[in-house]
Amino acid sequence: MAEAYFFLASERGVLTVGGPDRRAFLQGLISNDVEKIAPQQAIHAALLTPQGRYLHDFFLVELGETLLIDCERARLPELQKKLSMFRLRSKVTLEDQSERWAVAVIWDEDAREILNLPPEPGSAMNFAEGAIYVDPRLGAMGCRAVLPAETAAASLAKAGLEPGDQAAWDIHRMSLGVPDGSRDLPVEKAFLLESGFDELNGVDWKKGCYMGQELTARTKYRGLVRKRLLPVTVEGPMPAPGTLVMLGEKEAGEMRSGRDGHALALLRLEMVEAAKQSGPLTAGAAKLTAHLPGWIRLPEAGEA
């Protein structure tokens, strides 16, 4: 039998963007192309500082005349305030509708088949008076949904999905090397290209300017990425986020989120390579083994 799981992510909120200028308003601010969004297409994007450092990331899906932003619930007021600063005379509304809408994550190999969604990342459709879509970052991540809060769980169960939990979802996510917002991306410090946003469809290189675009583009085209956020398996006690990763006496990186022997860490690429010969990597009392997920693209030897 086909099998897939869902989890209602209470830590996620929904900010709605309405009004006739909603697309033009967001287009000059976020890292992806708002014009890609359609009833059949969702996107993932980020809002950066002018210096190109991470502030927020989120998913956008269209429902009728409104754009729904699936974002971190605890940081939604901050995101709403930040966007409001740029509204000026734009005909745009920004409303926190987290009580009305629930965000669900859906995973395992049969998720798209059960939901009858195309395999391409971001493929979307209306579902149970809301929207459901393939995770725009990576098809292997599964699907996401924004549904009426009162009926979300019942609608997903009726579709043939089994209830799951956050622990299983976290392990699935970390094993694929995909970050989870500010848990893995320090606010006003992280850079998108160190965190996989290029390969994970979070940046559009052909759209016009957006906040932080200059540094992001320069980093890509000059080949300046020397660290990457990577999945690691942990042998020993799970290090706290922020714990330094070491290779002998040399600093190799820093831990991010972790659970049950799986974690993410921001690592210097030359240290990951060196650890194959002189390892192991360590963080506190734990030994780490770094993995390169199949979706990641690293510079070839000799490239800038």
Image (spheres, helix red, strand yellow):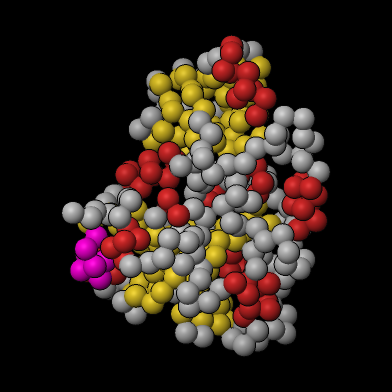
Relative horizontal placement of residue 259, taking residue 214 as reference (left or right): left
| Residue range corresponding to the magenta coloring | 155-161
Quadrant including the N terminus: bottom left
Any magenta on residue 158? yes
Magenta span includes 210: no
The one nearer the camera, 208 or 56, is: 208
Vertical placement of 20 versus 221: above or below?
Answer: below
Direction from residue 100 to residue 245 in the image, left or right: right
Q: In the rendered view, tell whether residue 18 sits above or below residue 278.
A: below
Residue 269, position as x, y percentages in the image: 65, 29
Residue 290 screen position, x and y as percent:
52, 28
Residue drawn at 43 percent across, 25 percent down: 234
Q: Position of residue 109 (x, y in %)?
A: 33, 51
254 up-or-down from 79: above or below: above
Residue 86 shows in the view: yes
Q: Is residue 196 above or below residue 73?
A: above
**Residue, far left:** 1
Residue lying at 58% horizontally and 69% vertically, measured from the top left: 80
Q: Residue at x 66, y 35 (%)?
A: 227
Where residue 114 sits: x, y (%)? 28, 63
Left or right for 110, reference 288: left
Q: How many marks?
A: 0
Q: Is residue 9 visible?
A: no
Depth check, front residue: 142 or 163: 142
Q: Based on the displayed image, in which of its 4 quarters is residue 113 positioned?
A: bottom left
Residue shown at 72% from the left, 85% from the top: 89
Tell me the quarter of the image containing the C terminus. top right
